[in-house]
Image (cartoon, rainbow, N blue to C red):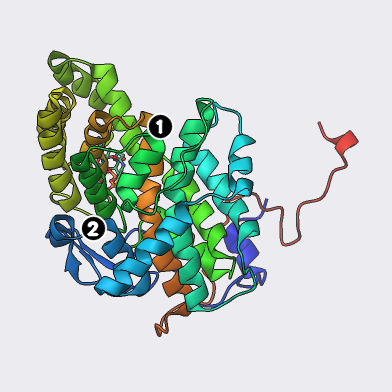
Amino acid sequence: MASLGEIMAGGREPVARGVSTKNVGLRGVTVADTAISDVDGQAGRLLYRGYSIEVLAERSCYEEVVHLLVMGDMPTRLELSSLRDALSAGRSLSPEAVGLLRAFAPRTKPVEVLQAVSAALAETDPAPGEAGRDAERRRALDLTGKMASLTAAWHRIRQGLDPVPSSFDLGHAADFLRMLNGSDPDPALARDLDVALILHADHSMNASTFVARAVASTRAHLYASISAALGALSGELHGGANAQVMEMLQEIGDLHAVEEYVRSRLEAGERIMGMGHAVYDTDDPRAVILREMSRRTGERLGDTRWYELTRRVQEATQRSFRERKGGDIYPNVDMYSASLYHVMGIPRDLFTPVFAAARVAGWSAHVIEERFAEAAEKPQLYRPLSDYVGQYCGPAACEYVPLEKRV
Ligand code: COA
């Protein structure tokens, strides 16, 4: 077999224009300009369009943040009221959408249902041919409403219950809890969820957002981008980690078992879910807020066991990590959202859909930016390269052996 050098010397044509620089996993590679959010991994800072996440979590509601991300600025009272109406209308599910949900086997994972139904919603778009930024914003708000109601409706349907219709009178987070449980939520829990949605609404160029933008760059519709992003989010190294954290806490079960659990996992070269981040070298600011919420809500509801367990896992992992690797590791956004959602009564397999119900606003904002921003460096179509490491059979392609002659 000829070597790659020989093949290249034989006049193999370059497959794409531009200078090839290899970077496996795209770490440290900037692929787009964005005005949506900024993560400073050294300082532990997260901004949505210039506003710090701490201020938004303390003073805003999720609907204001959706306006900020999707429409581009903080809303006036009037704008907020019309955005609330758009989200409420989005939460209302058509008989077709409910019919789609009823077609799944009850065991189907909620995040997979969301992924499939988000793509199929393209067929229910009232004006599918409508193009332009305003049309995409309309779709974005509709999908943001629907991600919550689809999650809640699927949870009801898989239990053999009817979906609870959405309400125009409640905020997005409160209505989500009402549609999930069939009763008006405790206002403090609704506010907890509201803040959790704010904290998960965007996070610059993470894996699912990159996927959403790459799909948008092909000029596929918004529904295709959101569906693809949901697939990326579902993985345990990304948005699937919050459910894995809960599974880990339930497996550990007891504070005395934490040290041994963490030690044996790390010794086996396994990862502790909810710990570590590709960008933050310090505290993830969202984890700091969620940790406090988990503690406070646990205390208020008289169940701090899961918060305490999480805290102990964090400390044991940090200690062990320091001893083994001589460096630091910090909890990420998924570490304390798990215990928080659990004490709020949200089932474990809905943790990632709740993440998606928040992040859909960020994904949509990125898709709109990808399609319509006039950034100088914006690519027309994402098209990275790969190094071929398969077999070469000489300057010509390999000889084809018919099936009956292959041994
Ligand atoms: N538990 C144990 N070790 C971890 C770890 C974790 N959660 N996260 C990273 N590490 C270790 C790796 O094993 C690696 O060690 P090595 O250099 O000896 O091989 C080192 O830290 C760097 O890992 P790497 O995967 O290169 O770091 P990263 O910054 O790319 O990782 C994550 C980011 C999120 C993929 C990683 O921290 C992880 O897998 N976390 C658990 C999953 C999770 O919580 N995901 C949600 C993210 S918001």
Camera-side residue of 129 and 259: 129
Ligand 1: quadrant of the figure: top left
Say left or right for 161 vs 306: right
- Residue at 55% across, 31% down: 108
Q: Position of residue 217 (x, y in %)?
A: 53, 70
- Residue drawn at x 33%, y 32% is 346
Query: Label 2's element?
Result: loop
Pick the quarter of the image with the C terminus: top right
Residue occupied by mark 2: 61
Q: x, y percentage for residue 257? A: 17, 15
Badge 1 density bin: few <14, some 14–19, many ≥20, Cα 10 Å = some
Farthest residue in the front direction? 169
Q: Residue at x 53, y 52 (%)?
A: 227
Residue 145 in sight = yes
Amino acid under disc 1: Asp
Mark 2 crowdedness (10 Å alpha carbons): few <14, some 14-19, many ≥20? some
Instruction: Confirm if mark 2 falls within 8 A of ligand 1.
Output: no
Q: Left or right: where does residue 260 sit relative to residue 91?
A: left
Instruction: Decide: is 245 above or below 293.
Output: above
Residue underneath mark 1: 349
Residue 185 left/right relative to 235: left
Could you say which is closer to the camera, residue 404 or residue 231?
A: 231
